[in-house]
Image (cartoon, helix red, strand yellow):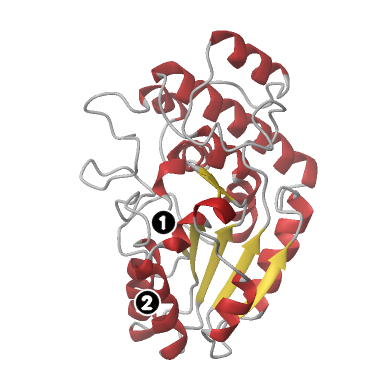
Amino acid sequence: MATTQELQDFSTQVRRDILRMVHAVNSGHPGGSLGCTEFFTVLYQEIMKYSTNFSMDGNGEDLFFLSNGHISPVYYSVLARSGFFPVEELATFRKLNTRLQGHPTTHEGLPGIRIASGSLGQGMSVAIGAVQAKKLNGDNSLVYTLHGDGELQEGQAWESIMYAAGKNVDNLISTVDYNKKQIDGATDDVLPLGDLKAKFEAFGWDVLEVKEGNSIEAIIAGLNEAKSRTGKGKPVCILLHTMMGNGIDFMMHTHAWHGKAPNNEQLEVALAQNVETLGDY
């Protein structure tokens, strides 16, 4: 098992990857990616059981489905640095005819990617199919998903939330990136979500909150607690309170960097706040 410092160092390098990827093509979504860096680090470096000898069926492995696919920079970085494909390939992000498109796709066969995502609201529906396949196959592995809080303004999300509880899907852990911001502003200003904990519970889910959603230790504790609640007849939801743009002082506390790349000067300032740990690509 990695130490907290090793996981923090990994997160710092992922944060540098995100910044450099979106800067290189002046395109992408750094805000949510930075906010979920610690979550992805813990999930892939500490929690999930998987093989980098990737197969689409994932028999005997824990699976992960990214529903809010626009935060692909953090996903690609963690997959590469976890051994799914060469780190050097991160330099092809969002370029023509590459495997690292702005939203994850499957037609180019990028290891680690099981669904095309980015059309918001659809990820849980697909994940539930994988969950039920595991049940039918007698596979006790878990399925993890990640969703944006603004994404829960989509009706399909609530259909799948209702279905999961109604069918006693209890090998599913769905995390909501609860940063309370989306591309057009605060979620409360765009379309208020109300009491998400109460809503998920009313739909029949077991819900826990991680108040310090950018803390390595808090995320480890939260995910382990969620795992302990699986297999008991209910799907499990984690409300992960994160900070959009976390780790970059001028990107935090605002929705402005949801889908905006830093310029040359801003990149240097941001990189200086996150000193290289594992080696840039």
Between 106 and 66, the residue placed more toward the observer is 66
Residue 114 in the image, given as x and y percentages of width and height: 33, 55
Q: Position of residue 110 (x, y in %)?
A: 31, 42
Give the residue type at disc 2. Glu
The amino acid type found where label 1 is placed reads Ser
Q: Secondary structure at mark 2?
A: helix
Query: Relative to residue 165, is residue 51 depicted above or below?
Result: above
Kindly identify the residue that appears in the image at 21 percent across and 28 percent down: 97
- Position above or below: 153 against 170: above
N-term mark: 2 or 1: 1
Using the image as rendered, state which of residue 150 and residue 230 is in the foreground: 150
Q: Residues within 10 Å of mark 2 (few under 14, many from 20)?
A: some
Does residue 158 appear left or right of residue 245 in this picture? left
Residue at screen point 55% across, 25% down: 19
Q: Residue 51 vs residue 194: left or right?
A: left
Mark 2, residue position: 159
